[in-house]
Image (cartoon, helix red, strand yellow):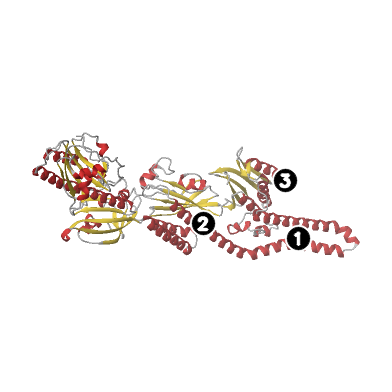
């Protein structure tokens, strides 16, 4: 067939996406074109669809011209366009003699022989959708039956195009609805009247996570681990979709999804029935909003307030510990919490409080103490920064496999508790599910640890203030006495020298000057020690910490003391390692040793035995100096470090001294992050114990 329906006009570009022909399948239209050709006993049949001011070839049969050349033709100035513009059938027995074709010929259409039978295709409203035609290369007379057959084919074309357009519109609306549903922040689920799940948007699939989506409301997966806002389990028939299917309309229903091995999630649900024709319920739909972050923010505020309240009502950190941990566990949903405090002297961190949720039925064993750098608390103390463990069951989690298995705990977080720049404790919390690091939660827990640190600082300040008030008068009285005694002696002997005659001066003058010199030296020594103590307390005195051999310093101090007491009824024994290296200031520590050895000798006026021991205990070096002298009563031991304090036994025996030696020694040791104290002693005498850390801090 060689008849060109374009009427001599060049093809125009096809319409873009969304045009009518882009949504119609041509397979059925080709069958319709073949049916038209056979019904009209013609060699060629075509179906065109209106697209703007053009006609697009929708279906064809028997074309000799390549289809792409006539895929799109204008309505104006074409034979098919006559059918569309007139809205009437077009019956032409001879294209060469028909007047209507002659008019088109004047517009440039080539005259060709043949016959043409066209019918408009309308929709249900009468609007023209396109046209169909039968074409013959030879002139002929179209019979009434052939004309009726093409007219019936046009009606079939109407149904075909309308159906496919309806399908496209339904599909378009469905895609539009899916896009809207998938763009929502709420998870949407719908079921039919039998409870079968028929719609789940992408947000709902994300809320389910790795869990398989249920196919119906009867599956257990729909209720496993679900509770209402009060914590009561939800049965299958109490789920929102089930209730909506029964006719209820739900607004703002609270749900909680929890269970071991997964973090707790909080949801708010709206649900309602879907009403079909005649008022019958044909299904139900629910919208689920994840409000976990909002709930978390509320719990964060509640937790912080509870912690502050617990600290405000507690007399000290030991009493506050259990209350703080209870507040953390109850408000944040942790399973277990622990508070550890550092014992610098022993080089360990000790457990002072713990709290577990009452619903947890597994045994949680907490060691009494941990060495520096060992276990979760010890490692956090060593690192000086928060440690988050996603699952303590994993290797290298700082928790022993046995403890992890027995406790059934998973995620763990350890936060150092600081006093100034130093970590004096660690706050540990554990969860019953594995959880990845959470910056918001980490910030909250760090804030709680800071509150505990501030509480301790405030408690220390208040305690120091009380001690200051208590010791102020004692200190003034002591310093007045210690300075007044040599000044009184100096004044008295100066007055005697002034009033003495020449004979008395010659006889007693040298002895009087010796007394004045001795008291002047004592006064100068007291003032020097007071200035040194002030410099150490204010940080103005230099203390340079660097690796040094403490054993060598002890040996030198002992040798010097042995030389000083040579010929006296006193012996000095030592038990020292060959070497003990730690960070310290050798000159300052030698000053401490001289004070301790000097006291041991001085307070053994009747002779005796002095023992000096140096050893390693945990992460600390322990230096002890013991004597068999007059000793110190238990109630006076701590007072020995307050400055210018002398025991009643020393005063009774008139043993000379300023009472500042131990105070200076403690100031030096504390600058080394250590401690010094008088400890229990078997038999007569005194033992002074100094502890110094082996690691730099």
Q: Quadrant of the N terminus?
A: top left
In the rendered image, residue 294, in percent from the top left (x then y), is placed at 38, 58
What residue is shown with label 1?
486
In the rendered image, residue 122, in percent from the top left (x then y), is placed at 18, 50
Would you identify the image quadrant in which residue 41 lies?
top left
What residue is shown with label 3?
564
Judging depth in this view, the residue of 449 and 176 nearest the camera is: 176
Q: Residues within 10 Å of mark 2 (few under 14, many from 20)?
A: many
- Numbered disc 2: secondary structure: helix
What whole-number distance in Å separates the C-alpha atoms at marks 1 and 2? Answer: 46 Å
What whole-number distance in Å separates the C-alpha atoms at marks 1 and 3? Answer: 25 Å
> From the viewer's perspective, is 102 left or right of 262?
left
> From the viewer's perspective, is 571 left or right of 245?
right
Q: Residues within 10 Å of mark 1 (few under 14, many from 20)?
A: some
Task: Reply above or below: 75 against 480.
Answer: above
What whole-number distance in Å separates the C-alpha atoms at marks 2 and 3? Answer: 48 Å
Q: Earlier in the sequence, mark 1 or mark 2?
A: 2
* Foreground: disc 1 or disc 3: 1
- Numbered disc 1: secondary structure: helix
Task: Reply above or below: 173 against 27.
Answer: below
| Residue drawn at point x = 62 percent, y = 50 percent | 671
Q: Is residue 166 visible?
A: no
What residue is shown with label 2?
453
């Amino acid at each position: 067939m060689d008849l060109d329906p374009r009427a001599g006009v060049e093809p125009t570009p096809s319409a873009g996406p969304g045009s009518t022909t882009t949504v119609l399948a041509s397979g059925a239209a080709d069958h319709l074109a073949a049916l038209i050709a056979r019904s009209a006993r013609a060699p060629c049949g075509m179906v065109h669809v209106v697209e703007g001011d053009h006609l697009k070839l929708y279906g064809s049969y028997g074309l000799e011209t390549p289809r792409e050349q006539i895929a799109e033709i204008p309505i104006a100035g074409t034979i098919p366009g006559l059918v569309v513009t007139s809205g009437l059938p077009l019956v032409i027995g001879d294209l060469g003699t028909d007047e209507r074709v002659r008019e088109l010929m004047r517009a440039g259409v080539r005259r060709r022989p043949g016959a043409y039978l066209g019918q408009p295709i309308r929709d249900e409203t009468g609007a023209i959708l396109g046209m169909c035609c039968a074409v013959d290369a030879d002139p002929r007379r179209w019979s009434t039956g052939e004309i009726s057959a093409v007219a019936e084919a046009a009606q079939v074309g109407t149904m075909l195009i309308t159906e496919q357009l309806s399908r496209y519109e339904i599909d378009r609306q469905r895609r539009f609805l899916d896009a809207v549903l998938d763009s929502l922040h709420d998870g949407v689920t719908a079921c039919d009247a039998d409870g079968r799940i028929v719609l789940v948007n992408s947000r709902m699939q994300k809320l389910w996570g790795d869990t398989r989506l249920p196919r119906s409301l009867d599956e257990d997966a729909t209720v496993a681990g679900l509770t209402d806002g009060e914590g009561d389990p939800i049965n299958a028939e109490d789920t929102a979709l089930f209730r909506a299917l029964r006719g209820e309309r739900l607004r703002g229903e609270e749900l909680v999804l929890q269970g071991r091995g997964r973090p707790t999630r909080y949801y708010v649900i709206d649900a309602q029935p879907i009403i079909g024709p005649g008022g019958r319920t044909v299904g139900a739909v629910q919208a689920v909003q994840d409000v976990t972050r909002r709930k978390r923010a509320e719990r964060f505020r509640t937790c912080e307030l509870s912690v502050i309240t617990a600290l405000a009502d507690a007399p000290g950190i030991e009493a506050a510990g259990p209350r703080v941990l209870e507040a953390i566990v109850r408000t944040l949903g942790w399973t277990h919490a622990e508070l550890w405090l550092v014992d610098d002297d022993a080089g360990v961190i000790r457990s002072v409080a713990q709290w577990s949720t009452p619903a947890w039925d597994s045994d949680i064993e907490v060691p009494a103490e941990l060495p520096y750098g060992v276990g979760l608390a010890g490692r956090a103390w060593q690192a000086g920064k928060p440690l988050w463990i996603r699952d303590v069951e994993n290797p290298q989690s700082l928790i022993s496999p046995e403890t992890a298995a027995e406790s059934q705990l998973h995620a763990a977080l350890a936060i150092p508790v600081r006093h100034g720049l130093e970590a004096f404790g660690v706050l540990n919390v554990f969860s019953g599910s594995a959880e990845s690091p959470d910056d918001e939660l980490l910030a909250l827990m760090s804030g709680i640890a800071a509150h505990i640190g501030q509480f301790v600082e405030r408690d220390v300040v208040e305690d120091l203030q009380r001690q200051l008030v208590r010791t102020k008068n004692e200190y003034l009285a002591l310093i007045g006495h210690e300075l007044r005694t040599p000044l009184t002696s100096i004044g008295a002997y100066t007055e005697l020298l002034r009033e003495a005659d020449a004979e008395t001066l010659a006889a007693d003058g040298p002895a009087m000057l010796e007394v004045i010199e001795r008291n002047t030296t004592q006064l100068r020594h007291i003032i020097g020690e007071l200035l040194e103590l002030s410099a150490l307390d204010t940080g103005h005195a230099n203390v340079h910490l660097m690796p040094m051999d403490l054993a060598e310093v002890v040996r030198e101090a002992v040798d010097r003391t042995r030389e000083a007491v040579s010929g006296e009824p006193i012996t000095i024994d030592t038990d020292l390692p060959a070497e003990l290296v730690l960070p310290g200031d050798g000159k300052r520590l030698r000053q401490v040793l001289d004070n301790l050895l000097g006291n041991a000798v001085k307070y053994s006026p009747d002779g005796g035995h002095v023992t000096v021991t140096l050893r390693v205990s945990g992460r600390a070096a322990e230096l002890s100096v013991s004597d068999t002298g007059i000793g110190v009563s238990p109630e006076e031991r701590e007072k020995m470090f307050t400055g210018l304090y002398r025991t009643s036994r020393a005063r009774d025996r008139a043993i000379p001294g300023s009472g500042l030696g131990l105070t200076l020694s403690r100031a030096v040791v504390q600058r080394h992050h250590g401690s010094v104290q008088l400890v229990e002693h078997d038999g007569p005498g005194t033992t002074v114990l100094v502890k110094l850390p082996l690691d730099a801090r």
